[in-house]
């Protein structure tokens, strides 16, 4: 729960490689195995170690160091799919036309080596969506989201929903977010997107249900309500004709997040308070 604010701050960014879940703080060991413990007998283990180290470096934004580790991983085992997936993520983060083109190749290699490697498919979907190749991204996210037993299903469905939003397929986006909530009732991304969808469609009761649920999660975390959720509460209070709640949340938003995009939108609406504030 302590990471909820960070999750919301990056909510418009599709969720790809889960570096913090895949790696540990590494000082020569990974899952209890030292890189030189078995010598050169277990090349796959060495590739795994180096890929985990690369993941840690990527998390720390030390991309050159990550690249070096992945090159060693490839030399150790050139059929180790996670190393290709990690290189795809590294190149995507580095950016630039040449790197982005190479990233596509690495993601496809990872999937070709292990078609059941769902994390690679999800990461490739993130890349495709960012590149505007939404149809291809939807194919990857749909496959991952329908894979029973994969722990990242809810995140893949959230990515699917946000990709549908990009192309204006609101109903399909809503369906994807609802499925994500069925898998993980505490997921933040699906709830907050559903709040906007239902407010936009003036489905007040449903919007309030999603909003109250997410607000309760935040209160339980002990963290301050973030700007986006506060602004959604303002929009909902206007829709419900609840001026007291609107005033309370407006004061919170303007005092705690005066430079936020949400504060700017609120100020614009206050200059001409007609209808529900725009999303």
Image (cartoon, grey):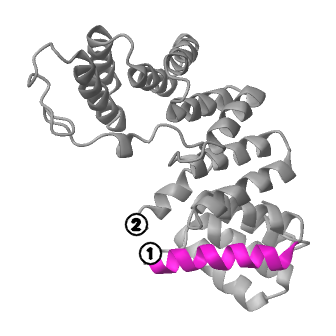
Q: Is residue 7 left or right of residue 29?
A: right
Callout 2 environment at 10 Å: few (<14), some (14 to 19), or many (20+)?
few
- Whether 275 is drawn above or below 8: the answer is below
Q: Percent position (x, y) of residue 137?
A: 69, 31
| Quadrant into which the N terminus falls | bottom left
Disc 1 from disc 2: Cα separation: 6 Å
Q: Which mark is residue 154?
A: none
**Image point (31%, 12%), residue name:** 77
Q: Which residue is mark 1?
A: 221
* Magenta residue check for 94: no
Per the image, label 1 sits on a secondary structure element best described as helix
| Residue 129 showing in the rendered view | yes
| Residue 260 showing in the rendered view | no
Q: Percent position (x, y) of residue 180?
A: 65, 56
**Where, by quadrant of the figure, is residue 248 drawn?**
bottom right
Q: Which mark is residue 2?
A: 2
* Magenta residue check for 217: yes
**Image point (86%, 45%), residue name:** 169
Q: Percent position (x, y) of residue 164?
A: 78, 43
Q: Percent position (x, y) of residue 53?
A: 26, 30
Q: Nearer the viewer, residue 260 or 96?
A: 96
Q: Which of disc 2 and disc 1 is earlier in sequence? A: 2
Circles 1 and 2: CB atoms closer than 8 Å: yes
Q: Nearer the viewer, residue 30 or 129?
A: 30
- Whether 6 is drawn above or below 156: the answer is below
- Whether 175 is drawn above or below 105: the answer is below
């Amino acid at each position: 729960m302590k990471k909820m604010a960070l999750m919301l701050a990056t909510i418009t960014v599709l969720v790809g490689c889960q570096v913090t879940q895949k790696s540990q703080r590494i000082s020569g060991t990974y899952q209890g195995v030292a890189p030189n413990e078995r010598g050169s007998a277990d090349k796959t283990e060495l590739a795994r170690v180096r890929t985990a180290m690369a993941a840690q470096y990527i998390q720390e934004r030390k991309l050159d160091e990550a690249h070096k580790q992945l090159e060693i991983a490839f030399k150790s085992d050139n059929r180790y799919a996670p190393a290709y997936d990690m290189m795809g993520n590294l190149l995507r983060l580095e950016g630039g036309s040449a790197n982005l083109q190479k990233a596509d190749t690495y993601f496809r290699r990872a999937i070709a080596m292990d078609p059941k490697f769902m994390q690679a498919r999800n990461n490739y979907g993130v890349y495709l969506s960012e590149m505007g190749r939404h149809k291809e991204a939807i194919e990857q996210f749909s496959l991952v989201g329908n894979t029973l037993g994969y722990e990242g299903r809810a995140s893949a469905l959230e990515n699917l929903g946000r990709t549908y939003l990009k192309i204006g397929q609101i109903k399909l986006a809503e369906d994807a977010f609802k499925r994500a909530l069925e898998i993980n009732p505490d997921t933040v991304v699906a709830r907050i997107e559903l709040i906007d969808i239902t407010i936009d469609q003036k489905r007040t009761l449903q919007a309030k249900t999603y909003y109250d649920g997410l607000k309760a999660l935040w209160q339980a975390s002990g963290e301050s309500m973030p700007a986006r959720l506060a602004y959604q509460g303002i929009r909902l209070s206007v829709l419900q004709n609840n001026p007291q709640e609107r005033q309370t949340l407006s004061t919170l938003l303007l005092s705690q997040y005066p430079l936020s995009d949400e504060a700017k939108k609120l100020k614009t609406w206050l200059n001409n308070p007609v209808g529900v504030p725009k999303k």
